[in-house]
Amino acid sequence: MKKFQLFAIAFLIAQGSFSQSESAFETGEWLKFKMSYSGWMKAGNATLKIKESVINEKPVYHVVGKGWTTGAIKWFFKVKDRYESYFDKQTGLPYKFIRNIDEGGYTKNLEIVFDQVNQKAHIHDKKHNKKFIIETKPNVQDLVSAYYYLRNQIDASNLKKGDEFTTQMFFDKENYRFKLKYIGEEVIRTKFGKVKTLKFIPHVMAGRVFKEEEGLTLWVSNDKNRIPLRIKADLAIGSLRADLEAFKGLKHSFKIVVE
């Protein structure tokens, strides 16, 4: 279900020309998001958790993202998604990506191994028992790794309204050129209180899902964590919103605006 995937799409944020000397996250971080449709109907939940693993004798971060429907929606359209990314602790480049989803009976089970040196994606379509190789762009990111790469690169002091950044992404079986525009700072009300944020608009394809090219908006905390606090998508029919519901294991202090 494309509408439910919007939460994941928001993590396709470009790396651009950002620079932050200290890591924004560490092993053990866990984030939970509440999703709602058209501002009132509870649609589901999503979580992101950082673990550690080893690939080809290299220590890597292993991030597991899960999404599932809740409330009345799950009775007529059940979603159970799982995304995993294994990426280098130093460079942030992914070595392996897993997408295992069930969205109202529509299923996919893909495992992608990235050869960053030779710029190849080795894809195993487990559902159809097929394997093939597709050429990728240099320093390509997957759906999940891009978000964490960005968090380690943002430098708010160098951002100006209207700045645009691009990056090369690989999702499922295709390469994408993704563009992001910085809108400015904004203080928003959250479950935890008022929080200073940085606001971005990713450029997406208008049509069946999105109302317009700039129909997706992202707010991230304007602190050293750079965690997403809110994601809003204007769809062809209605809107979808995700809000941070809970968190554990943040590396840096989470700042609330004190009035």
Image: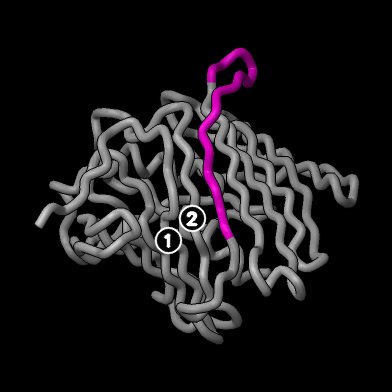
The residue under label 2 is: 33
The residue under label 1 is: 243
- Which residue is at the front of the view, 257 or 101? 257
Question: Left or right of 118: which side holds 154?
Answer: left
Percent of width and height locating residue 79: 71, 62
In which quadrant will I find the C terminus? bottom left
Residue 116 visible: no
SS at circle 1: strand
Question: Left or right of 84: which side holds 30?
Answer: left
Nearer the N terminus, badge 2 or badge 1? 2
- Using the image, determine if residue 91 lies above or below residue 105: above
Percent of width and height locating residue 6: 54, 65
- The type of colouring in the image is one colour
- Which residue is at the front of the view, 170 or 77? 77
Percent of width and height locating residue 231: 42, 64
- In the image, the segment drawn in magenta is 45-59
Distance from the alpha carbon under mark 2 to that under mark 1: 5 Å
- Which residue is at the front of the view, 107 or 170? 107
Image point (59%, 22%), residue name = 53
Residue placed furthest toward the bottom: 237
Q: Is residue 51 magenta?
A: yes
